[in-house]
Image: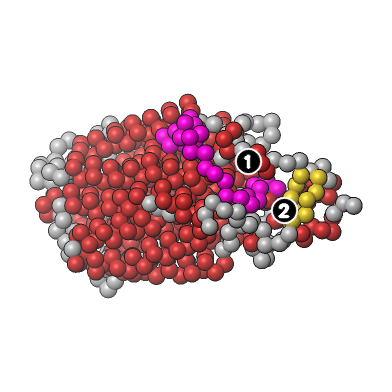
């Protein structure tokens, strides 16, 4: 059925002239809270669960492994921490089961992103065939079920664990394109930045909860590291069941949406009654696509590479125990989450008439969100000695700055081509995912023989450079207006389409 006409309405439609006064009255009665907000609230929880399932391995791996082969055997130099490295062993309430080298641990952490990378392009086709609601719900249910299998897979063999993590990545690779498609149908233009920022801020909320709670669970003898995968896997299955029962693909399909809210949404985002042919040539030759792609890769490097490797840095270099590790590794993402709530409303405020253009606002947000972390990370490499407090503060500041990108490149797909937002996101997210493949592997190679601050500084310099290049590409190439190749000319008639419930305002 893909590529055929897909009905966007559960009822008949009434066609009225655009200048009808009653139609304008409906638009002016903007609903303050409605089903669109319930949808993104449930989606927020879903993205939180998704990121918990993604990041729990980063802190759990610290408790699972002894890594005797990868310990730093050299005497510390002036750039290394000299806090007692026995702090964790003396306070440890858990037993490490596996002795995996840094290189093997790098493969375990990267495995998720191999599956994530492979599923991006297929995701754009799946969501257009089966709808964002269904694909999103089923993919997170599969990911959650795989979480339940993780402990036994690890005990069977490291390669079994790598396969499970890759399959989890494959299932999660469908989630963002699915949500982009849903947002293109549910997010009115005036609320677009806020709805996108709120929905995707679930990623930071999940990162905070996942790392923090995983640290607590891993440090207890009664529960231990396997409980992390059982508890959050079960939570994910419950969320997916609720989503499939109560979420709806479009406003027209929702049985409890009010007339005014339905028209308010459809009048600004359209009804998309047809599956449009994807203009691949125009998309792949558009500078606007490569602007988002550059920023997406840079931001994902921070989100994926730093998120994946930060607990290891906290343990091996700064010598924090597992409880401190969980708290301090989650702190940067707590700040990033808070910034997300500021960035969305701020961007929509700046985009109001007679203020800044959409392009300028998106570039401003990305500039703060990418150049800010670049400076913070580069300053980190110049800190004398250990400086644990200042190091954690700068890493927290870096992630806090990056929170502004949620109102920059993350929503820019919907600015330039709302009808093809899922396709564009699949393309840019494919490139962004490469960072998750490279980052942990790079850390594994750098720290295989020398787990020192100077080796990690190389990683921070690479990260700061990537942030800077990505920000520059976006500033030079980004666009904020609807692109010519994304305009639905066949639907640009001088009429407004109202659902049949508006028959009471029909003109004779």
The residue closer to the viewer here, 248 or 189, is 248
Q: In which quarter of the image is residue 393?
A: top left
Q: What element carries label 1?
A: loop
The residue closer to the viewer here, 177 or 307, is 177
Q: What element carries label 2?
A: helix
Are there few (<14), some (14-19), or many (20+) residues within 10 Å of tag 2? many
Q: Earlier in the sequence, mark 1 or mark 2?
A: 2
Residue in the image at 82% along x and 58% along y: 503
* 477 in relation to 20, above or below: above
Left or right placement of residue 68 versus residue 57 in this view: left
Q: Position of residue 146 (x, y in %)?
A: 33, 65
- Residue corresponding to mark 2: 263
Residue in the image at 51% along x and 58% along y: 130
- Residue corresponding to mark 1: 488
Can residue 230 be seen at all in this image of the molecule?
yes
Left or right placement of residue 321 versus residue 206 in this view: left
Residue in the image at 61% along x and 31% along y: 357
* 507 in relation to 222, above or below: above
Q: Position of residue 188 (x, y in %)?
A: 64, 47
The segment highlighted magenta reads 267-294
Left or right placement of residue 185 versus residue 261 in this view: left
């Amino acid at each position: 059925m893909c590529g055929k006409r897909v009905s966007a309405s559960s009822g008949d439609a009434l066609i009225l002239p655009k200048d009808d006064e009653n139609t304008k009255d409906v638009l002016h009665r903007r609903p303050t809270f409605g089903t669109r907000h319930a949808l993104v609230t449930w989606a927020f929880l879903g993205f939180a669960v998704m990121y918990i399932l993604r990041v729990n391995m980063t802190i759990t791996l610290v408790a699972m492994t002894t890594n005797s082969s990868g310990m730093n055997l050299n005497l510390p130099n002036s750039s290394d921490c000299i806090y007692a490295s026995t702090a964790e062993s003396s306070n440890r309430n858990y037993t490490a089961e596996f002795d995996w080298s840094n290189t093997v641990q790098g493969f375990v952490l990267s495995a998720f992103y191999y599956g994530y990378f492979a599923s991006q392009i297929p995701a754009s086709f799946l969501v257009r065939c089966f709808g964002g609601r269904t694909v999103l719900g089923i993919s997170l249910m599969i990911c959650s079920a795989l979480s339940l299998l993780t402990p036994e897979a690890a005990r069977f063999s490291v390669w079994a664990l790598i396969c499970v993590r890759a399959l989890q990545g494959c299932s999660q690779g469908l989630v963002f394109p699915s949500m982009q498609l849903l947002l293109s149908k549910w997010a009115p233009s005036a609320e677009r930045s806020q709805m996108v920022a709120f929905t995707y801020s679930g990623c930071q909320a999940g990162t905070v909860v996942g790392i923090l709670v995983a640290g607590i669970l891993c440090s207890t003898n009664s529960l231990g590291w396997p409980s992390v995968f059982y508890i959050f896997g079960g939570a994910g299955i419950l969320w997916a069941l609720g989503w499939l029962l109560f979420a709806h693909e479009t406003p027209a399909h929702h049985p409890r949406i009010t007339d005014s809210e339905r028209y308010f949404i459809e009048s600004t985002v359209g009804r998309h009654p047809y599956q449009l042919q994807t203009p691949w040539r125009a998309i792949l030759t558009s500078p606007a696509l490569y602007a988002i792609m550059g920023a997406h890769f840079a931001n994902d490097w921070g989100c994926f590479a730093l998120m994946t490797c930060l607990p290891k840095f906290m343990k091996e270099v700064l010598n924090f125990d597992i409880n401190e590790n969980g708290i301090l590794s989650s702190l940067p993402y707590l700040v990033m989450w808070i910034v997300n709530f500021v960035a969305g409303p701020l961007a929509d405020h700046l985009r109001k008439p007679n203020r800044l253009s959409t392009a300028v606002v998106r570039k401003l947000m990305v500039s703060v969100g990418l150049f800010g972390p670049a400076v913070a990370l580069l300053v980190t490499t110049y800190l004398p000695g250990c400086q644990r407090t200042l190091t954690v503060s700068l890493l927290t500041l870096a992630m806090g700055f990056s929170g502004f990108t949620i109102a920059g490149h993350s929503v820019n797909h919907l600015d330039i081509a709302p009808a093809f937002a899922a396709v564009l996101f699949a393309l840019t997210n494919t490139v962004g995912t490469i960072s998750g493949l490279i980052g942990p592997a790079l850390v594994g190679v750098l720290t295989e023989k020398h787990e020192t601050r100077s080796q990690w500084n190389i990683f921070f310099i690479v990260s700061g450079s990537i942030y800077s290049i990505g920000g520059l590409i976006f500033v030079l190439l980004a666009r904020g207006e609807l692109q010519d190749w994304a305009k639905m000319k066949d639907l640009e008639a001088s009429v407004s389409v109202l659902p049949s419930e508006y028959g009471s305002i029909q003109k004779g």
